Image (spheres, rainbow, N blue to C red):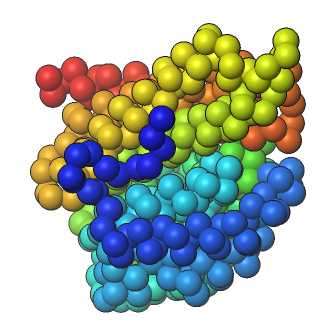
């Protein structure tokens, strides 16, 4: 069973430079992350020093233009980095380190030169933590109905409301935040960068989750926060379109995470069934086990190839709104199935804390919710069929 990603016939999605990046990142993860990941999972966060380290190594800047402090590269550089972050065995670590990849793109695409210097460069250097603020306590997937208000008063916007389920929200220094500057519906939404030290900005309790333990997740509240109008990203009342554009890349990366979750579960299942003895022979010696592994491996290969194909078309500038929604749903379904089967192959051990497949099983669950639920993806697909 092949586990080598990125190959189909003579086509390669990843070039030599990307493979060098992958190997460099894998070595850092092996040395600096994996030995501590169980401790960080239990603590509910990883050290802030990891941002400094990944910034110094240029890993945070992968896929971002050098003009904004990035390391250059394209979408497949980012995918390679995301896959290696997942090699930590913790979706929470990957999500926490990677929260900049949903927080910064709106600023990179729509921000002014001054905004990029202030809000992008320090984050890519690992000196500031960035988060994205869209979801609200009463809103969920109904993004067009968000209620956090931003009222213009001279050179400031006065912000009132709150956000929830914010990845990296406990420690974030800045929040790329969707607010209502106009009337009801999608056409009244704008984006502002709100800094943590703004009076009236407060972080609620750190939320405890089923999975992704190593990522801090927060509720954030705004009580008459006065935010400079200079922090407006793009045009006023055009934020909904930025959200939709941002969602496409988030959904692609969630597909990558789901595929890697399944890949790791498959690898663990292969290893365990070779080593575990039952009735006088390894579990892999039973046909039912081998066939289950074949089914798992087939799903992983198919899902990964489809995700890469969609990524290649996005990288080429081809619209893939429908296809990336399909890729996310399919990958998350594969992750559900493969992690379930991996736990089943491990038996009781697969249900125990400290067993990697137990964590993978928990971590995978959020992927079909975050970035747009399975049901929202189906609505998007149905409208574009």
Image quarter of residue 63:
bottom left
Question: Taking 44 as reference, is 224 left or right?
Answer: left
Decide: is 187 above or below 228: above
Q: Would residue 316 be visible to someone looking at this image?
A: yes
| Residue 355, picture quadrant | top right
Whole-percent x and y of residue 71?
Answer: 40, 82
What residue is rendered at 30% in x and 37% in y?
306
Q: Quadrant of the C terminus?
A: top left
Query: In this view of the protein, can residue 107 be seen by the observer?
Result: no
- Examine the rendered structure and indicate whether residue 283 appears above or below residue 151: above
Above or below, 115 relative to 8? below
- Camera-side residue: 167 or 195? 167
Give the residue drawn at x 65%, y 82%: 52
Instruction: Name the residue nearer the viewer: 371 or 292.
Output: 292
Counting from the top left corner in percent of width and height, residue 324 is at 29, 39
Residue under the point 21% across and 53% down: 11
- Quarter where residue 144 is shown: top left
The picture places residue 299, in percent across and down from the top left corner, at 43, 27
Using the image as rendered, state which of residue 23 and residue 80 is in the foreground.
23
Q: Residue at x 49, y 20 (%)?
A: 295
Residue 354 percent location from the top left of the image: 85, 41
Residue 49 vertical position relative to residue 326 in the rendered view, above or below: below
Left or right, 23 with reference to 104: right
């Amino acid at each position: 069973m092949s586990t080598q990603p990125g190959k189909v016939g003579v086509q390669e999605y990843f070039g030599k430079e990307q493979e060098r990046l992958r190997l460099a990142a894998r070595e850092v993860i092996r040395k600096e992350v994996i030995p501590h990941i169980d401790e960080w999972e239990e603590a509910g966060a990883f050290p802030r020093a990891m941002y400094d380290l990944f910034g110094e190594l240029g890993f945070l800047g992968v896929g971002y233009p050098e003009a904004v402090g990035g390391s250059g590269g394209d979408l497949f550089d980012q995918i390679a980095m995301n896959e290696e972050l997942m090699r930590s065995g913790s979706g929470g670590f990957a999500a926490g380190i990677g929260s900049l990849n949903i927080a910064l793109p709106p600023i990179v695409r729509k921000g002014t030169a001054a905004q990029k210097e202030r809000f992008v460069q320090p984050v890519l250097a690992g000196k500031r933590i960035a988060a994205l603020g869209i979801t609200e306590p009463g809103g969920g997937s109904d993004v067009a109905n968000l209620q956090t208000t931003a009222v213009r008063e001279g050179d400031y916007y006065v912000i009132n409301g709150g956000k929830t389920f914010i990845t990296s929200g406990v420690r974030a220094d800045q929040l790329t935040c969707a607010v209502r500057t106009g009337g009801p519906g999608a056409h009244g939404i704008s984006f502002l960068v709100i800094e943590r030290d703004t009076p009236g900005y407060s972080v609620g309790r750190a939320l405890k989750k089923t999975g992704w333990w190593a990522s801090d997740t927060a509720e954030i509240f705004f009580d008459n926060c006065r935010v400079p109008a200079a922090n407006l990203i793009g045009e006023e009342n055009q934020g909904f379109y930025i959200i939709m554009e941002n969602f496409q890349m988030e959904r692609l990366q969630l597909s990558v995470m789901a595929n890697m979750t399944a890949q790791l579960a498959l690898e663990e299942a292969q290893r365990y069934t070779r080593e575990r003895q039952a009735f006088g022979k390894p579990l892999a010696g039973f046909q039912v086990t081998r066939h289950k592994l074949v089914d798992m491996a087939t799903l992983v290969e198919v899902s990964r190839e489809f995700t890469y194909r969609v990524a290649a078309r996005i990288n080429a500038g081809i619209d893939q709104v429908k296809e990336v929604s399909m890729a996310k749903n399919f990958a998350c379904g594969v992750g559900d199935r493969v992690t379930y089967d991996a736990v089943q192959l491990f038996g009781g051990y697969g249900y125990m804390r400290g067993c990697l497949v137990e964590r993978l099983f928990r971590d995978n669950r959020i992927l079909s919710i975050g970035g747009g639920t399975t049901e929202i993806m189906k609505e998007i697909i149905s409208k574009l069929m």
